[in-house]
Image: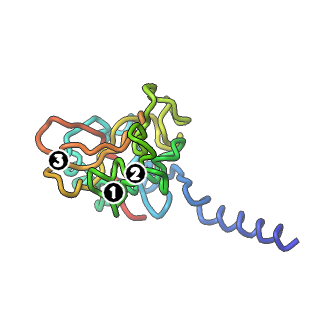
Amino acid sequence: MKKIVFALFLTSFLAACGGSEGSYSLETENDKNVVVGKGLMWYYSDGSDPLNLFNQMAYSEAVKFCGDLDYAGHNDWRLPTIDELRGIVEGYSDLESGGRCKVTSKCLQTSCVIKGQKNGNDTPCSNPSPEIMQGNGPKGCYFDDVWGDYCGKYWSSSAVQGAVAMSFQLDFSDPAIIATTTSGMSSFGYARCVRKK
């Protein structure tokens, strides 16, 4: 009986707080759509928003876009860390928070991509299958439906330590975490801006 009462209490508490950990919801703030969860607020666009800049851009453009963004009544937007992006991954356990991939804010060297390999062919930070877009999200993305269907590589603010002008990207279509050059206009990705809730 005590277990049932506790389970009901926990369910009610989680519902009152916006869901279980790991859940995100689409909300409206100051007449703008945002995604909220895990203490964060994320920029959201369904493609009809005139501020929609979900076009792939160079790293410097992505940093500028988020830094200049004045949206939903807030102007403290920034690029997310690799940990924050991993918190969005759904359907590929190696890249989800706490998964086998060792690239986190505590491990940002290029060697972290292969840490924990079981053998030379093992890829803990990327999908070894040649097939992409096999996730449960929209159009096969490896995130929940709430994020829309902008699948592909997203910039993180997490610089690759020990490398010159490189940052980690998370590809939600493959899925994979990739160390990518940030210099010039040779590498592109999406910017999904975030702020503390």
Left or right: where 70 falls relative to 86? left
User: Label 1 belongs to which residue?
Assistant: 81
Q: Amino acid at mark 2?
A: Leu
**Residue 175 in which image quadrant:** top left
User: Label 2 belongs to which residue?
Assistant: 85
Q: Residue furthest front?
A: 119
User: Label 3 belongs to which residue?
Assistant: 60
Left or right: where 126 falls relative to 183? right
The Cα atoms of the two marked residues, 3 and 2, are separated by: 18 Å
Asked if the residue at tag 1 contacts the one at tag 2, i.e. Cβ–Cβ closer than 8 Å, the answer is yes
Q: Residue furthest top?
A: 131
Q: Residue at x 45, y 25 (%)?
A: 131
Mark 2 residue element: helix
**Residue 20 in which image quadrant:** bottom right
Q: Residue at x 17, y 52 (%)?
A: 163
Q: Amino acid at mark 1?
A: Thr
